[in-house]
Image (cartoon, helix red, strand yellow):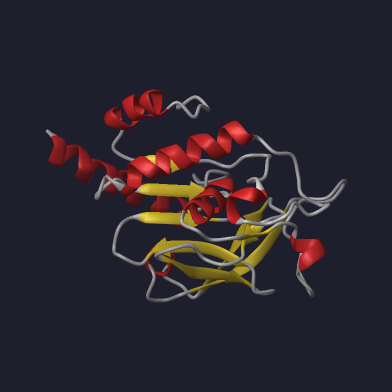
Protein backbone atom coordinates (compact mmCIF):
# COMPACT_ATOMS: atom_id res chain seq x y z
CA UNK A 1 0.00 0.00 0.00
CA UNK A 2 1.35 3.41 -1.00
CA UNK A 3 -0.06 6.66 0.46
CA UNK A 4 -1.31 9.31 -1.94
CA UNK A 5 1.48 11.87 -2.16
CA UNK A 6 3.47 13.79 -4.74
CA UNK A 7 6.63 13.53 -2.62
CA UNK A 8 9.09 11.84 -4.95
CA UNK A 9 11.44 10.73 -2.15
CA UNK A 10 8.61 8.96 -0.31
CA UNK A 11 7.41 7.20 -3.44
CA UNK A 12 10.97 6.32 -4.46
CA UNK A 13 11.40 4.50 -1.15
CA UNK A 14 8.27 2.44 -1.78
CA UNK A 15 9.34 1.67 -5.34
CA UNK A 16 12.72 0.43 -4.09
CA UNK A 17 10.85 -2.17 -2.01
CA UNK A 18 8.48 -3.23 -4.78
CA UNK A 19 8.81 -5.72 -7.61
CA UNK A 20 5.56 -4.79 -9.34
CA UNK A 21 3.10 -1.88 -9.33
CA UNK A 22 -0.68 -2.32 -9.28
CA UNK A 23 -2.67 0.85 -9.95
CA UNK A 24 -6.17 0.21 -8.54
CA UNK A 25 -9.50 1.79 -9.34
CA UNK A 26 -10.88 4.98 -7.82
CA UNK A 27 -14.29 6.67 -7.54
CA UNK A 28 -12.65 9.79 -9.01
CA UNK A 29 -11.62 11.05 -12.45
CA UNK A 30 -8.24 12.14 -13.79
CA UNK A 31 -8.04 15.93 -14.09
CA UNK A 32 -8.56 16.84 -17.78
CA UNK A 33 -5.81 19.46 -17.60
CA UNK A 34 -3.32 16.58 -17.64
CA UNK A 35 -4.32 15.76 -21.21
CA UNK A 36 -4.95 19.30 -22.38
CA UNK A 37 -8.75 19.24 -22.18
CA UNK A 38 -11.35 21.51 -20.63
CA UNK A 39 -13.51 19.90 -17.96
CA UNK A 40 -16.83 18.57 -19.29
CA UNK A 41 -19.97 19.26 -17.27
CA UNK A 42 -20.31 15.53 -16.59
CA UNK A 43 -16.79 15.23 -15.18
CA UNK A 44 -16.84 13.41 -11.86
CA UNK A 45 -15.14 14.12 -8.57
CA UNK A 46 -11.42 14.88 -8.74
CA UNK A 47 -8.66 13.75 -6.40
CA UNK A 48 -5.45 15.53 -7.48
CA UNK A 49 -3.34 13.65 -4.92
CA UNK A 50 -4.19 10.33 -6.56
CA UNK A 51 -3.28 11.71 -9.99
CA UNK A 52 0.05 12.92 -8.61
CA UNK A 53 0.80 9.60 -6.92
CA UNK A 54 0.12 7.55 -10.05
CA UNK A 55 2.15 9.89 -12.26
CA UNK A 56 5.20 9.87 -9.96
CA UNK A 57 4.98 6.09 -9.66
CA UNK A 58 4.83 5.78 -13.42
CA UNK A 59 7.80 8.15 -13.79
CA UNK A 60 9.83 5.67 -11.74
CA UNK A 61 8.41 2.69 -13.66
CA UNK A 62 9.59 4.16 -16.97
CA UNK A 63 13.14 4.12 -15.62
CA UNK A 64 12.84 0.52 -14.36
CA UNK A 65 13.00 -1.64 -17.45
CA UNK A 66 11.52 -4.80 -15.96
CA UNK A 67 9.01 -3.39 -13.44
CA UNK A 68 5.58 -4.92 -14.25
CA UNK A 69 2.49 -2.71 -14.03
CA UNK A 70 -1.17 -3.67 -13.89
CA UNK A 71 -3.67 -0.80 -14.10
CA UNK A 72 -7.32 -1.36 -13.17
CA UNK A 73 -10.14 1.06 -14.13
CA UNK A 74 -8.76 4.43 -12.94
CA UNK A 75 -5.34 2.77 -13.24
CA UNK A 76 -5.64 2.23 -17.01
CA UNK A 77 -6.78 5.84 -17.35
CA UNK A 78 -3.90 7.35 -15.36
CA UNK A 79 -1.44 5.11 -17.23
CA UNK A 80 -2.83 6.30 -20.56
CA UNK A 81 -2.74 9.98 -19.58
CA UNK A 82 0.78 9.65 -18.17
CA UNK A 83 1.90 8.41 -21.59
CA UNK A 84 0.35 11.35 -23.39
CA UNK A 85 -3.04 9.86 -24.21
CA UNK A 86 -6.50 11.31 -23.61
CA UNK A 87 -9.78 10.17 -22.08
CA UNK A 88 -13.46 10.25 -22.95
CA UNK A 89 -14.68 12.38 -20.05
CA UNK A 90 -18.20 10.94 -19.98
CA UNK A 91 -19.19 8.00 -22.18
CA UNK A 92 -22.99 8.55 -22.14
CA UNK A 93 -22.64 12.24 -23.03
CA UNK A 94 -19.86 12.02 -25.59
CA UNK A 95 -20.14 8.67 -27.36
CA UNK A 96 -23.05 8.24 -29.76
CA UNK A 97 -24.64 4.81 -29.42
CA UNK A 98 -22.79 4.00 -26.21
CA UNK A 99 -23.86 0.93 -24.31
CA UNK A 100 -24.12 0.78 -20.53
CA UNK A 101 -20.78 0.96 -18.73
CA UNK A 102 -21.67 2.06 -15.20
CA UNK A 103 -24.12 0.81 -12.61
CA UNK A 104 -27.34 2.77 -12.16
CA UNK A 105 -29.69 3.15 -9.19
CA UNK A 106 -31.81 0.10 -8.42
CA UNK A 107 -30.36 -1.88 -11.32
CA UNK A 108 -28.06 -4.91 -11.28
CA UNK A 109 -24.32 -4.26 -11.82
CA UNK A 110 -23.45 -3.80 -15.50
CA UNK A 111 -21.79 -6.60 -17.42
CA UNK A 112 -21.00 -6.61 -21.14
CA UNK A 113 -18.94 -8.43 -23.74
CA UNK A 114 -15.48 -7.35 -24.91
CA UNK A 115 -13.69 -8.42 -28.08
CA UNK A 116 -10.05 -9.42 -27.58
CA UNK A 117 -7.08 -9.14 -29.91
CA UNK A 118 -6.00 -12.74 -30.40
CA UNK A 119 -2.31 -11.84 -30.66
CA UNK A 120 -2.34 -9.96 -27.34
CA UNK A 121 -1.37 -11.13 -23.87
CA UNK A 122 -4.97 -10.55 -22.80
CA UNK A 123 -6.20 -12.71 -25.67
CA UNK A 124 -3.75 -15.50 -24.86
CA UNK A 125 -4.68 -15.49 -21.17
CA UNK A 126 -8.39 -15.59 -22.00
CA UNK A 127 -7.86 -18.25 -24.72
CA UNK A 128 -10.95 -17.02 -26.54
CA UNK A 129 -11.90 -14.14 -28.84
CA UNK A 130 -14.34 -12.47 -26.45
CA UNK A 131 -15.55 -12.60 -22.87
CA UNK A 132 -17.98 -10.96 -20.48
CA UNK A 133 -16.63 -8.42 -17.98
CA UNK A 134 -18.03 -6.27 -15.20
CA UNK A 135 -18.23 -2.52 -15.78
CA UNK A 136 -18.09 0.36 -13.29
CA UNK A 137 -16.86 3.39 -15.22
CA UNK A 138 -18.10 6.48 -17.05
CA UNK A 139 -14.73 7.40 -18.58
CA UNK A 140 -12.43 5.46 -20.90
CA UNK A 141 -9.31 5.69 -23.05
CA UNK A 142 -9.88 7.97 -26.06
CA UNK A 143 -6.49 8.43 -27.74
CA UNK A 144 -4.02 5.72 -26.65
CA UNK A 145 -0.82 7.01 -25.10
CA UNK A 146 2.75 6.38 -26.21
CA UNK A 147 3.54 2.67 -26.81
CA UNK A 148 0.07 1.58 -25.68
CA UNK A 149 -1.96 -0.69 -27.95
CA UNK A 150 -5.72 -1.19 -27.47
CA UNK A 151 -6.38 -4.93 -27.21
CA UNK A 152 -9.98 -5.20 -25.96
CA UNK A 153 -13.11 -3.39 -27.10
CA UNK A 154 -16.74 -3.19 -26.01
CA UNK A 155 -19.38 -3.58 -28.71
CA UNK A 156 -19.80 0.21 -28.83
CA UNK A 157 -16.10 0.67 -29.58
CA UNK A 158 -14.98 1.72 -26.11
CA UNK A 159 -11.37 0.66 -25.46
CA UNK A 160 -11.41 -1.81 -22.56
CA UNK A 161 -7.73 -2.84 -22.30
CA UNK A 162 -4.29 -1.71 -23.42
CA UNK A 163 -0.85 -3.30 -23.48
CA UNK A 164 2.67 -1.96 -23.89
CA UNK A 165 3.97 -2.44 -27.42
CA UNK A 166 7.62 -2.90 -26.45
CA UNK A 167 7.16 -6.29 -24.79
CA UNK A 168 7.10 -5.05 -21.20
CA UNK A 169 4.36 -6.29 -18.86
CA UNK A 170 2.47 -3.01 -18.67
CA UNK A 171 -1.22 -3.84 -18.92
CA UNK A 172 -4.35 -1.82 -18.23
CA UNK A 173 -7.92 -3.12 -18.05
CA UNK A 174 -11.03 -0.99 -17.70
CA UNK A 175 -13.00 -3.64 -15.79
CA UNK A 176 -12.34 -4.99 -12.29
CA UNK A 177 -10.69 -8.44 -12.30
CA UNK A 178 -10.29 -8.23 -8.51
CA UNK A 179 -14.06 -8.62 -8.16
CA UNK A 180 -14.84 -12.32 -8.22
CA UNK A 181 -11.37 -13.46 -9.28
CA UNK A 182 -11.73 -16.73 -7.36
CA UNK A 183 -14.51 -17.81 -9.71
CA UNK A 184 -13.19 -16.24 -12.91
CA UNK A 185 -10.41 -18.13 -14.69
CA UNK A 186 -9.24 -15.15 -16.76
CA UNK A 187 -9.01 -12.80 -13.76
CA UNK A 188 -7.02 -15.40 -11.85
CA UNK A 189 -4.71 -15.93 -14.84
CA UNK A 190 -4.13 -12.18 -15.18
CA UNK A 191 -3.12 -11.78 -11.55
CA UNK A 192 -0.92 -14.87 -11.67
CA UNK A 193 0.86 -13.47 -14.74
CA UNK A 194 1.43 -10.17 -12.93
CA UNK A 195 2.81 -12.00 -9.90
CA UNK A 196 5.01 -14.14 -12.15
CA UNK A 197 6.50 -10.99 -13.71
CA UNK A 198 7.09 -9.49 -10.26
CA UNK A 199 8.81 -12.71 -9.16
CA UNK A 200 11.11 -12.51 -12.19
CA UNK A 201 12.15 -9.02 -11.10
CA UNK A 202 12.58 -10.21 -7.50
CA UNK A 203 14.80 -13.10 -8.57
CA UNK A 204 16.94 -10.79 -10.67
CA UNK A 205 17.41 -8.50 -7.67
CA UNK A 206 18.70 -11.14 -5.23
Q: Residue furthest right?
A: 106
Q: Please give the name of the residue rendered at 28% of the width and 28% of the height, measured from the top-left corner.
A: 17
Task: Tell me which corner region of the image, top left, top right, bottom left or bottom right, holds residue 154.
Answer: bottom right
- In this rendering, the answer to whether 27 lies above or below 118 is above
Q: How many marks?
A: 0
19 with respect to 175 (left or right): left
Which corner quadrant holds the C terminus?
Answer: top left
Asked if residue 151 shows in the view, the reply is yes
- Image quarter of residue 100: bottom right
Of 84 and 70, which appears nearest the observer? Answer: 84
Residue 141 percent across, percent down from the top left: 59, 61
Q: Residue at 49% of width from left, 75% of height from top?
A: 129
In what quadrant of the picture does the N terminus appear? top left
**In the drawing, does residue 151 fall left or right of residue 132?**
left
Residue 193 in percent (x, y) is at 33, 52
Q: Is residue 147 left or right of residue 89?
A: left
Horizontal side, residue 3 vs residue 166: left or right: right
Above or below 147: residue 105: above
Determine if residue 175 is in view: no
Residue 2 image position (x, y, % from top left):
45, 27
Please report the residue visible at 20 percent of the width from the left and 37 percent of the height from the top: 202
- The x and y percentages for residue 151 are 48, 70
Query: Residue shown at 50%/58% (left/top)?
Result: 84
Amino acid sequence: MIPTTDDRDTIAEYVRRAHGILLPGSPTDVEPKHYGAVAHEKLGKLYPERDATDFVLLDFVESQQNMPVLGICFGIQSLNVHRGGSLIQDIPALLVGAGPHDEQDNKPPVRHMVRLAEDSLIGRLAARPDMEVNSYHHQAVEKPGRNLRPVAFANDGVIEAVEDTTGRFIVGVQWHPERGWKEDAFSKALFLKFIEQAMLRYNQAI
